[in-house]
Amino acid sequence: MIGFQNVDFSYEKDRKVLHDMSFGIGKGESVGLIGANGAGKSTIMKLMLGLLGPDSGRVLIDGIEVKKDTLSDIRAKLGFVLQNSDNQMFMPTVYEDMIFGPLNYGLPRDEADRRVDEVLGRLGLEYLKNRYNHKISGGEKRMAAIATILAMEPEAVLMDEPTSALDPYNRRIVINTIKSLDQTRLIASHDLDMILDTCDRVILISGGRIAADGPAEKILTDKELLEANRMELPFRFAGR
Amino acid sequence: MNKMQKALAELAEMDELAAMRSPVHRLHPGAKLITTIVYIMITLSFGKYDLPGLVPMVLWPAMMFSLSGVRVRTCFYKLRIVLPLVMAVGLFNPFFDRQTMLTIGGIAVSGGVISMITLMLKGVFSLMASFLLMATTKIDSLCAALRKLHVPALLVSLLQLTYRYVGVMTEELAVMTDAYHLRAPGQKGIHISAWGSFLGQLLLRSMDRAQELYSSMILRGYHEHFHYADIDRFRGRDALYMLISVMFFVLLRYGNISQLVGGLVVR
């Protein structure tokens, strides 16, 4: 579904953020992208979405190379949940935000309406439909942001820190929602307990390179590996 | 809640007012837009000394406030910053135009005073009509109506995005003002020495946020034009509203209602 082939990227000349990065994510996989601040997690996601272009190498989504003329097709396949839901929800109401994407992709309004209702029903968020974005709580906003993406029926969902700044109750709701998705999932986060709950596989990034790639359970219990890459064990394993 | 947060809440309240249900809210946005424009044009067309003719123009906004359920107090409260500026427009007229136009109870009233009041009322009535339009019509519906009236898509998108961008900037300003005051206790406002960096930071921060918002939009298929609200088609009742309103304006403009009403009570 997602492929990185020898990708190099730099924001500034002579300061590479990603070095010769290659990996692949299969359809339906749930992958956690972890690494210290500045490791390059968000950059990887932005390259997939075509918000940034690689210096060299290729990024492929469902076999299509991410290029200027394929962006529309690529973005129809990917849903991106931003770290800050306030930046994702820019319309007055949750309903208007949810219908924004489907309408842009040419869906008739009644079909888009049906999708909005279906997603809200699936997530148990019917009560949010006509609420104003500025009047809902942080947890509700995060769930609504996920709903706006699901209403587009993407083939893969990318999430940047989906549980940041959430209380334990709302965090658990978001985790259960992520677990219930059947799309390909790529989740960038420092919340390693959440990664362990939602992902089968983990890619550990360090200094713009892949430091480890394998089963979540294996990588997230490897104290030495994590500490060598400025990470710590998930809280549930702390003290081991 | 600091001033900026209050401003943000007030901005959001406009969306809530526009989502109310009333006969005026249900009217076609295009009909309301055109009627408002005609009202403003007719209001502005009164001569500078035609105060008696102008005053009855308040009847239309008064009726609309009553029918829409939007409170007049809300209008004046939200326009409290702009109103004094509008009122100040003719402030110097009394100094330049001293010719006595009428005498009330022995007090001479100059042409300057009358033209000042006329100018003020024109401004206030126009603002009231504009507020009514915004308070009874969602911005999306208004943009949809503008597109139906063949206003270029670029201009309409610009209007829509500006409306949203004001909110983004105000949010950033609210956060920065809070951060400033937490480290500058007892200070009123922002000290002049901090204005440069404050404004610079505000610009950079709001540009960053705007970039994020824009990314969120293009990732959801935005292609430089909005799919505006699905507005109802123009119905008979909308045409009737426009017709009656415009006829009423023309009657007020050329019928000299003040003289008519005055003639009923004074011989």
Image (cartoon, rainbow, N blue to C red):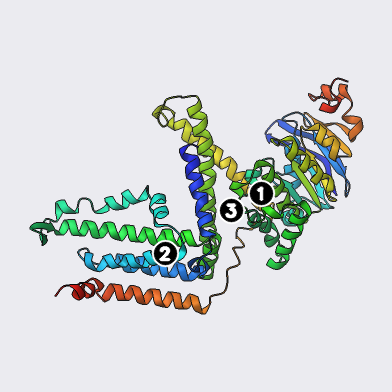
Q: Residues within 10 Å of mark 3 (few under 14, many from 20)?
A: many
Question: Which of the chains bears the disc numbered 2?
Answer: B
Residue in the picture at 82% in, 22% down: A227
Q: Is residue A71 visible?
A: yes
Considering depth in this image, is B247 or A99 the residue closer to the camera? B247
Reply above or below: B217 against B255.
above
Q: Is residue A162 visible?
A: no
Of badges 1 and 2, nearer the viewer stands 2
Image coordinates for residue B6, horizontal then vertical, percent: 48, 42
Image coordinates for residue B85, horizontal then vertical, percent: 32, 49
**Which residue carries the number 3 mark?**
A92
Image coordinates for residue A219, horizontal then vertical, percent: 89, 30
**Which residue carries the number 1 mark?**
B216
First reached walking from the N terminus: tag 1 or tag 2: 2
Considering depth in this image, is A16 or B61 the residue closer to the camera? B61
Whether residues under marks 2 and 3 lie with C-beta atoms below 8 angstroms apart, the answer is no
Whether labels 3 and 1 belong to a single chain: the reply is no
Image coordinates for residue A5, horizontal then vertical, percent: 84, 42
Question: Which of the chains bears the disc numbered 3?
Answer: A
Considering depth in this image, is A11 or A114 the residue closer to the camera? A114
Of badges 2 and 3, nearer the viewer stands 2
Q: Amino acid at mark 2?
A: Ser
Left or right of A3, for residue B204: left
Residue in the picture at 51% in, 63% down: B142
**Which residue carries the number 2 mark?**
B66
- Mark 1 and mark 2: Cα distance apart in space: 40 Å
